Image (tube, rainbow, N blue to C red):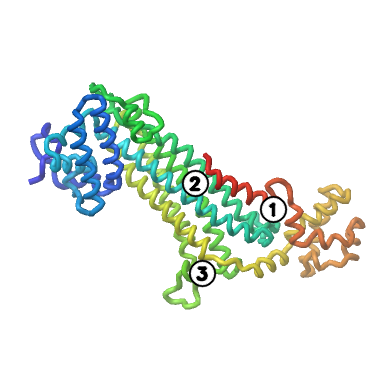
Amino acid sequence: MTEQKTWSQRFESALHPAIACFNASIGFDIELIEYDITGSVAHVKMLAHTGIISESEAQQLVAGLEQIRSEYHQGKFNPGVDAEDVHLAVERRLTDIVGDVGKKLHTARSRNDQVGTDTRLYLRDQIDQIRNQLRHFQEVLLNLAKAHVETLIPGYTHLQRAQPVSLAHHLLAYVEMLERDWQRLGEIRRRVNISPLGCGALAGTTFPIDRHHTAETLHFEGIYGNSLDGVSDRDFAIEFLCAASLIMVHLSRLSEEIILWASQEFGFVTLIDSCATGSSIMPQKKNPDVPELVRGKTGRVFGHLQGLLVLMKGLPLAYNKDLQEDKEALFDSVNTIKACLEAMTILWQEGLEFRTERLASAVTEDFSNATDVADYLASKGVPFREAYNLVGKVVRGCLASGKLLKDLSLEQWQELHPAFEEDIYQAIAPIQVVARRNSYGGTGFDQVRRGIQDACDRLNSNHD
């Protein structure tokens, strides 16, 4: 016979077993057990602080809750579907441990404000962990940037060779993206860190609780000012999934570049064996599984964001059971991001090797220095648009004759325009092309070194 539920005295019969399974969330919200116990300990201490329960009762409840925490860590507390959710599982076990005083745990509290508190405690903790991971990944990219300031790589627009850039400059672009991710999560954390505990089911409580006491105990920065909003708000979860989606966008873009660079057509990087796999049928293959998986997992995080937006869009105030569906989306997104950041950090730290000779060759085999010819003429007083059109004709002629700009003789240059002098060859040398782009934020080596130093300063200060 199915066990009667805590709430079921209103009902004449037990819940149908299939419905009980469908209704239960214990299979996934057990993830919240540490936070549920921590929130309950704070709630108990507040109940004693306000005289709602005695100090002796509070001590028994806290000891019992900490015993449950210990049992869970030791693998001795594994509630099943009959527990319905983590909150009832803890309360039931607490009553087994301390007796009837355990039934006082839920005084002046609803599962609605309880789950909201647990979720915020969980997400606050996970945001801190993810931000630490972002910092570590930035450090890895920065160390690579320091080693490759004067390593050149083709820069692309429309996936067409555009202008050569410093490899360090390219890596710094991702350091900047990750910096925005780090900052964005810090901003979201402040809105996560608001306590709904004490909002009750939807309307508050008749007990003389002290919501500020529990908020301070749990290190929340404030409390919800409206009980209806407090139990039904999931803006913070949606904001997190927005930030999570952007993190995955950045990781996916970087993954796509690795996949391209590792191909035979590009040949810019070699994959180290410890971070690549082979083919089951083609023995020559070395596959970039890590970036491919990151690129693939991006879609699931996007899907969770869309799912939560659709979940929330039609919910009337206050709490609705639909909100149970926020957990799996949140948990899976957190786990996906953490796994992807860890894998990408390892890949960039020890799984890639840049083929510097191939890169050096790549920046000399195209017309990505054409803009510098136009700039050269403009510096000699030729109007830029006129210079631009002239260089376009030069490139067309070179393509027809199978030459590059560096292959033209000085006489050929001067036939094109008398402003050309011997220094044209220095002006179009790839190293000079990159070095001269020294405008603020550009790829010039001085600017790149400044960018590295600025990024290092940010990481060392670690301020939001």
- Mark 1 or 2: in front is 1
Q: Could you tell me which secondary element the residue under label 3 belongs to?
A: loop
Name the one closer to the observer, 420 or 107.
Answer: 107
Counting residues from the N terminus, which is met first, the one under dot 1 or under dot 2? 2
The CA distance from mark 2 to mark 3 is 28 Å
Q: Quadrant of residue 46?
A: top left
Residue tagged by mark 3? 272
Q: Where is residue 185 in the image (x, y as percent from the top left)?
A: 47, 42
Asked if one can make out residue 228 in the rendered structure from this viewpoint, the answer is no
- Label 1 close to label 2 by CB (< 8 Å): no
Image point (29%, 34%), residue name: 42
Q: Quadrant of residue 200?
A: top left
Residue tagged by mark 1? 443
Identity, as a three-letter code, of the amino acid under mark 1: Thr
- Using the image, tell me which numbered label, if any, was put on residue 246: 2
Q: Position of residue 71 (x, y in %)?
A: 21, 50
The CA distance from mark 1 to mark 2 is 25 Å
The CA distance from mark 3 to mark 1 is 28 Å
